[in-house]
Amino acid sequence: MRPIFFSRLRAAASGIALLASACIASAESAHGIAMYGKPALPAGFTALPYVNPDAPKGGEVVFGNLGSFDSLNPFTSKGNPPWQMRFWGYESLMGRSYDEPFSLYGLLAESVETPPDRSWVEFTLREEARFSDGSPVTVEDVIWSYETLGTEGNLRYRGFWAKIDSIEQTGPRSLRLTFNTEDRELALIAGLRPILKKQQWDGISFADAPPDMVPIGSAPYVVKDFELGRSVTFARNPEYWGANLPLRRGTNNFDTIKLEFFGDQTVLFEAFKVGALSAVREFNAAKWDTDYDFARVQDGAVIKTEIPNQKPSGMTGLVMNTRRAPLDDWRVRQALIDAFNFEFINDTLTGGRLPRITSYFSNSYLSMQDGPASGRVAELLAPFADTVPPGTIDGYALPVSDGSERNRANLREARKLLQEAGWTIQDGVLKNADGEALVLKVLLQHGNLGEEEMQKAVDIYATALERLGITLTTDLVDSAQYVERQNDYDFDLTFFRRALSLSPGNEQMLYWGSEGADAPGSRNLMGMRSPAAEAMIQHMLTTDSSDEFIAATRALDRILTAGRYVIPIWQYTKSRIAHDADMRFPLRIPIYGDGYYYMPEVWWEAED
């Protein structure tokens, strides 16, 4: 399960100002690169603004993951590795500041150069850069990593490789990538590819390596010990080469980080209650109020921390598989959305504490605006007026119930739409003209926290659908079956969580592009095919104007939301984390808040 990230709420206008006030650069500064204008931090900065540069080193933290793992290679499509591995154990040429939406700074690379049109990017490696075994990071390693990940690695790396026209060494420690596609983000993506050691793989198939073969990286942590399926321990490398870099000062402070795997959320929580785990994130506001009064909270050994965030809400809910009839009909999908009584379900499961997701980029300045499209957003959508889903241009909003269990008004709307789509009640069952009953199955993973909550929501939802003559059942499966069935799109509806950032880019094509609609294992779970969406993404990637970027993202948000692909549930505008009292974090929190880049990266163990 992916983490929920936490941040201190700051005025959304500051994010707009950062993006909109930036002038278009004629060349990027040598120490960093930004999508628009210049990075916020000057050359010679000493540490990220949200870290404690004097944080003490030492201590151990233990976190719990749900499910299992059968691989220690996070870069191939084979196996299921711990998701944290690729962030804790590996580095790229550039690194992010999570206080800026669209800026990178030198990590393995000491400098970066790119022309105004971003048709190429050149990096110069730091002379002191080393892998964890002490060997130098070379240009040869970098070129090999790009090619290997792009041809044999996980699918998430392959799209970028297809956009490289050439990659060549230009000096003892420098290389240049030239692109074959107009795309301003490519120079930044190039800086974020993980770099591995070529020599380790001489004579070994990267894609088919043994599951216990750990790729050598250059990051602060290395795998110290593991038991496949049960636990993995990371140790901070005392000889880490980059400890004093501006991007690293005050980070990676714990000596040991251990991941324990649990098959059930209840068992994981009990382990935390007795002190076997160092921290947990709670996604249910009602549980936060009722279940966190155990002894270790009462005696001060555990602290409850609440931190609001200003990232886009992303999308969480039940995604509908449009590859299957009748879910390929927007009217049926809208009827299913109408029948989902969010207000009643939210009140029942969370005490009504969590607001609903209203669009994919809601809770941010990138979200679609209420009412009809206007200004530049309307102009971008106009060429697709005949093909975009109803409501995209005229305005679309999710239905709101009266909060009662019956939800009569919305169910009436659902019946009308179903009838228009050719579904009528026959002998108490909703059937089409061929006499086929409307029966839907929801695919959920057993033991997953978010999906346990969704199971409860589905139980309430199924009762409402019965009133429409629709049968809804649940397939609750283990993690291996779950992954396999999602990869094969063997579901009608399934749990969906897609985190989105303030810097959406090429990944949007992976999420919503038609190329992945039928490709097994793609991120496009709903199977959408939308030329309009792809045109908006392309505009986001090629424009040199921050205003144009915002308009295109808002237009994309309209297309996605009015597409009625997901039945949205609640968003986490305020995040909740319970942790050992000796775990500390800086007072200033970046706009992206907590995540693999924040906890445990900038936390530390208090000396007292």
Image (spheres, rainbow, N blue to C red):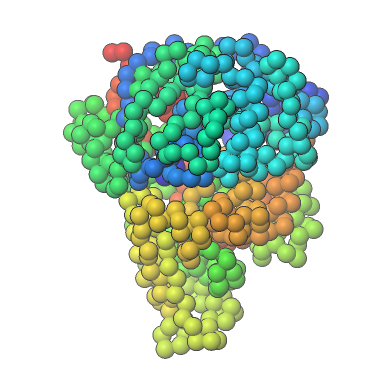
Residue at 23% across / 31% down in the picture? 275
Residue 134 against residue 95 in the figure, above or below: above
Residue 477 against residue 506 in the figure, above or below: below
Report the front residue among 410 and 193.
Answer: 193
Residue 279 against residue 553 in the figure, above or below: above
User: How many numbered badges does the structure rendering display?
Assistant: 0
Report the front residue among 486 and 452.
Answer: 486
Q: Residue furthest bottom?
A: 427
Q: Residue 402: give x, y in percent of width and height.
A: 44, 64
Residue at 35% across / 44% down in the picture? 68
Q: Quadrant of residue 232?
A: top left
Q: Residue 542: give x, y in percent of width and height.
A: 76, 40
Q: Is residue 104 visible?
A: no
Q: Is residue 501 visible?
A: yes
Q: Residue 253: give x, y in percent of width and height.
A: 41, 18
Residue at 36% across / 49% down in the picture? 448
Q: Residue furthest front?
A: 203
Which corner quadrant holds the N terminus?
A: top left
Left or right of 175 in this view: 586: left
Q: Residue 460: give x, y in percent of width and height.
A: 36, 65
Left or right of 257 in this view: 492: right
Residue 485 against residue 214 in the figure, above or below: below
Residue at 42% across / 24% down in the picture? 222
Report the front residue among 89 and 22.
Answer: 89
Left or right of 125 in this view: 320: left
Which corner quadrant holds the C terminus?
A: top left
